[in-house]
Image (cartoon, helix red, strand yellow):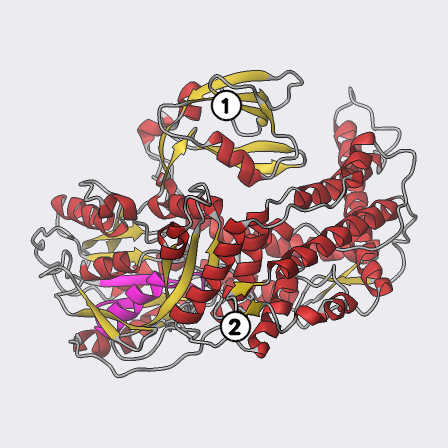
Amino acid sequence: MFKKTFLFRFLFVLLLSAVAQPLFSAELSDSVEQMLSLEATLQRPTLREKLIAKRVVEVLLSNHYQKQQMTPELSAQWYENYFCFLDFDKTLFLAADLEEFKSYETVLWDRRTRTANLEFAFIVYQRFLERVREWAVFSIACLEQPHDFTIEEYITFSTDNRQWAKNREELQDNWRKKVKNLLLLEQIRLAEEAEQAADDAARDEQKTAPETARTEEPIILRQKKNYARAYKRRLELEPIQIVEMFASSFAQLFDPHSVYMAPRTKEDFDINMSLSLQGIGASLFTAGAYTEIAHIIPGGPAEKSGLLKSGDRITAVAQDGEEPVDIMDMPLQQVVSKIRGPKGTVVHLTILPEGSSTTQVVSLIRDEIKLTDQEAQAECREISTPQGRKARVQIIYLPTFYSDFNGKFNQKEDFTSSARDVQKLLQQAQEQGPLDAVVLDLRGNGGGSLQEAVDLAGLFLQGGPVVQVRYYRGQIEKMRDPLPEAIYSGPLAVLVDKFSASASEIVAACLQDCGRALVLGDKSTHGKGTVQTLYDLDRDPQIQGAATILNHAPTGSLKITIGKFYRINGSSTQVRGVTPDIIFPAFSDYMEVGEERLPHVMPWDVIPPTHFSVDQEMAAKLPAWKQVAEKYLTESKDFQEYLQDLEFFGKLREQKQVPLNIAARKEYIKQEKAASDMFRKFHTQRRQARKPKATADDQNQSKPVPDKTQDLILEATLAILGELHQSQPPAVSPIHTIP
């Protein structure tokens, strides 16, 4: 699975940084003062945290694919990377802060005692808290200062090549610009609202235009609380969360995908992989001090009750038979852990319904929730061929390579599996009649289970190797198709984009190398060609030996890179990804995405190819397929409009500075909105095109409503398949079951 960077950085994404003397006005609410007056006193690491840090370092040094020795140089890299984890955009710490703690730089690991220097981790986090408070105080004071929005001034949000600030003045100027930017956007918004209200009043004589525009007071008061709350939340981190960041800042010196996951983080990871959880069936997000319901999951207790809806706010949580716990200002991860629980148990939520000022208590019985939006989906299309016949095409959408590892390990008969789900969809389609072609859509698929990728590729192969994996000890494993015959052996197209990563790249590369499929999409896939495994620290011999001392508390897992993927032709997918046979221009051409953008990436390389069969017919057809693609792109009016959108989007992305002059910013916002609308339109069309099409019965009309929503890339793919379709569809393949 890929991310731009480590998943825990979300803890620190809210504008970090500051330094100033306490500057409070009488207008500050007690709640803000109270939050800012909290002392930054940390709990100290226990034996549990010390043992976790020790084992994470030892396992990485001995088992990571890129073997490294703990040298003073590696310790120095760890030293700076920890500062980067806390302050990823370098807008909080000063260069002087890094210099102050220099004595720790080369001694973060004691070779004699084989222990990690957690004293350093907690001392630096203490300084981090001090800086966050200083930033909050400075920013609150800055909110009430006058700002000139007529002068020519710019703010830069890009962190490329940014260095640690040399002095407080440099930091404070950045923070001032951030506050000014916030107030500028609010001023523009209020002006637009006032103008809209006046227009509405002019159209309706019964309404009157507002005498005055809204003041800036609401945004100021709201933002004061946000700044103070940012400090309070970071103050509430548990010691294990600090160790999580410290240990992960070391892990990611090896590669961007190795990371230590504390117990709560590991729980979230398991849910994403199994596509199921036990809870109430609602996704949540933080809205100021509140936890708000973002989405109700179909089929869950929340939906069945009919008592909850999107926009409702949760203010307290109580377990059955216990007193409610106030969750205002509580970190989202902690809230989620209180709401989740075993199937069949009861949880009581105090809810502030959207648009209401009166709370109510909703009691729900927890149940197993299936995250069906990430499951494989399919639809069957009919397309026209030059021969005048209708061709039947099965389109399979696969958002991720999921697998219920525990269910599979325990030999559960119906365990969740992406490959098994795709197999069912193919067989169901073939039961309705022969298929002329299949499109496997892996766009946006960030990967997942390696075995699922192998199993899925095997659905389209007549045996043979799928991928090569070289492990940290140098041994090479050739993972093969587990089925004796293909489930489907007809024409096949695979769609990818820059966000197709890891397992997606394995499938696309194998089917391309074998000549089994035509691969279409962005210039290249993501380029994540590494293999990770989960090292369960609870099963570590040293931790098990201390289980009694640790009170059997869970210790989490280490996700560690133990190998690299290689195509069956010997080339790595690392960094370079997979280059499609037919390339479509894309928004990603102008976006900073891909493995090459991540720090400490492992390099591309090659190993000897393995023996595999190639369908030469595909290679012979490829020039003709490319001609058809070029013809379609040239003649399609929709695609020409799309290319114009891309050009506009690319020019705006070239701008690195954003104006703080109100007139210039209004023009910039217009362009930004236009570019954003283009990007949103493209992806909305792709999502909408996957939904079931409306019928006459659905709409109580005499004839179906035409659906104008088009997935341009998919439509281009179908057009190419239709024009080059010549042969009769193959016979239905025999049914085999994936082991």
Circle 1: element type: loop
Q: Residue 460: image x %, image y %?
A: 18, 61
Residue that appears at 48% across and 55% down: 52
* Classed neighbour count for the residue bearing mark 2: other residues with Cα under 10 Å, few (<14), some (14–19), many (≥20): some
Q: Can see residue 709?
A: no
Closer to the camera in the image, 615 or 455: 455
Residue 660 image-quadrant placement? bottom right
* Amino acid type indicated by mark 1: Leu
Q: Is residue 182 shown to the viewer in this render?
A: yes
> Residue 164 is drawn in which quadrant?
bottom right
The quadrant of the image that shows the N terminus is: bottom left
User: In this image, 97 relative to 261: left or right?
Assistant: right
Magenta-tinted stretch: 492-518
**Number of numbered labels in the structure image:** 2
Residue type of the residue flagged with mark 2: His
Res. 33 mark: none
Name the residue that disc number 2 marks: 600
Relative horizontal placement of residue 338, taking residue 189 as reference (left or right): left
Q: Tag 2 or tag 1, which sits nearer the N-term? A: 1
Q: Nearer the viewer, mark 1 or mark 2?
A: 2
Task: Please provide percent x and percent y for residue 41.
Answer: 72, 45
98 displayed left or right of 184: left
Query: Considering only vertical position in the picture, is 17 above or below 646?
Result: above
Residue depicted at x 65% and y 69%: 654
Query: Which residue is drawn at the image coordinates 74% and 59% (left, top)?
Result: 92
Q: Mark 1 points at which residue?
A: 308
User: Residue 173: x, y in percent?
Assistant: 84, 60
